[in-house]
Image (spheres, rainbow, N blue to C red):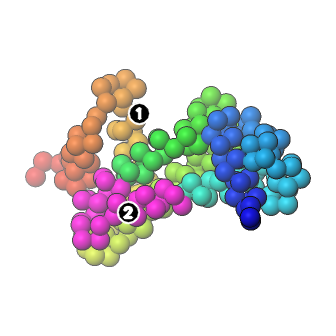
């Protein structure tokens, strides 16, 4: 029977990073969890950073798949955006590795954890940017800088979905959608 040792190592490392964080994970722990010798890890990955990068890449691909499953080409940009962004952030908030990395960034500021969270957020923003550009091309949105707009939309969503509730009652998806329509679709100016 063929044993995919590389896959075992990646799964074990993902488990270790999820449980202990980047800083506290050692290659010895990964080897023990994967039930392989430490040297076996180094036949596939030159160091812990490379292994972590592989795991983050898989996490980003999983998250993109979740978003793609939610996307409906027959819907307008604004019909799609809220559902997709909610699914992506929900995925991020429920995925143990992303949660542990966010805690490590907050509590310790480990540079590699910061880099991992930045890659995750960058992937979300890039995904939104692509969808914004497609909406601009279809004349659903005014011409704008898609990258900056994606960044603003992402940060506004995060602020409303998580930052707001630190000192206020949490907003539900419907209220966040209403606020997005007010700020981004309709604007604040009185006509």
Q: Which residue is mark 1?
A: 163
Check disc 2: other Cα within 10 Å, few if <14, some if 14-19, many if 20+.
few
Q: Is residue 36 above or below residue 2?
A: above
Q: Nearer the viewer, residue 103 or 152?
A: 103
Residue at 51% across, 58% down: 62
Q: Tell me where residue 104 appears, x and y as whole percent.
A: 63, 34
Q: Nearer the viewer, residue 75 or 156?
A: 75
Would you say residue 93 sits in the magenta stretch? no
- Residue 25 visible in the snapshot: yes
Q: Which residue is mark 2?
A: 69
- Numbered mark located on residue 35 in the image: none
Q: Is residue 165 above or below residue 191?
A: above
Q: Tell me where residue 16 appears, x and y as whole percent.
A: 69, 40
Between circles 2 and 1, the one closer to the viewer is: 2
For residue 149, which quarter of the picture?
bottom left
Q: Secondary structure at mark 2?
A: helix
Check disc 1: other Cα within 10 Å, few if <14, some if 14-19, many if 20+.
some
Q: Main secondary structure of the magenta part?
A: helix
Mark 2 vs 1, N-terminal side: 2
* Circles 2 and 1 in contact, beta carbons < 8 Å: no
Q: Secondary structure at mark 1?
A: helix
Q: Nearer the viewer, residue 129 or 172?
A: 172
Left or right, 175 with respect to 40, comes to left
The residue stretch that appears in magenta:
61-84
Q: Is residue 121 above or below residue 128?
A: above
Q: Tell me where residue 45 appears, x and y as whole percent.
A: 80, 58
Would you say residue 81 sits in the magenta stretch? yes
Residue at 24% across, 71% down: 74
- Residue 146 visible in the snapshot: no
């Amino acid at each position: 029977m063929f044993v995919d040792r590389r896959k075992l190592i990646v799964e074990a490392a993902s488990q270790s990073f999820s449980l202990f964080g980047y800083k506290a994970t050692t290659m010895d722990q990964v080897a023990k969890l994967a039930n392989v010798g430490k040297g076996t890890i180094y036949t596939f990955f030159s160091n812990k950073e490379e292994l972590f990068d592989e795991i983050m890449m898989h996490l980003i691909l999983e998250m993109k798949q979740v978003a793609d499953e939610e996307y409906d080409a027959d819907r307008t940009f604004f019909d799609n955006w809220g559902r997709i962004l909610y699914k992506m952030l929900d995925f991020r908030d429920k995925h143990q590795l992303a949660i542990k990395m966010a805690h490590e960034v907050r509590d310790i500021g480990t540079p590699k954890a910061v880099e991992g969270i930045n890659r995750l957020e960058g992937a979300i923003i890039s995904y939104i940017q692509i969808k914004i550009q497609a909406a601009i091309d279809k004349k659903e949105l005014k011409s704008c800088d898609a990258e900056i707009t994606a960044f603003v939309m992402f940060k506004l969503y995060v602020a409303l979905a998580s930052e707001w509730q630190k000192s206020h009652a949490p907003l539900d998806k419907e209220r966040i959608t209403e606020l997005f329509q007010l700020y981004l679709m309709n604007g604040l100016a009185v006509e």
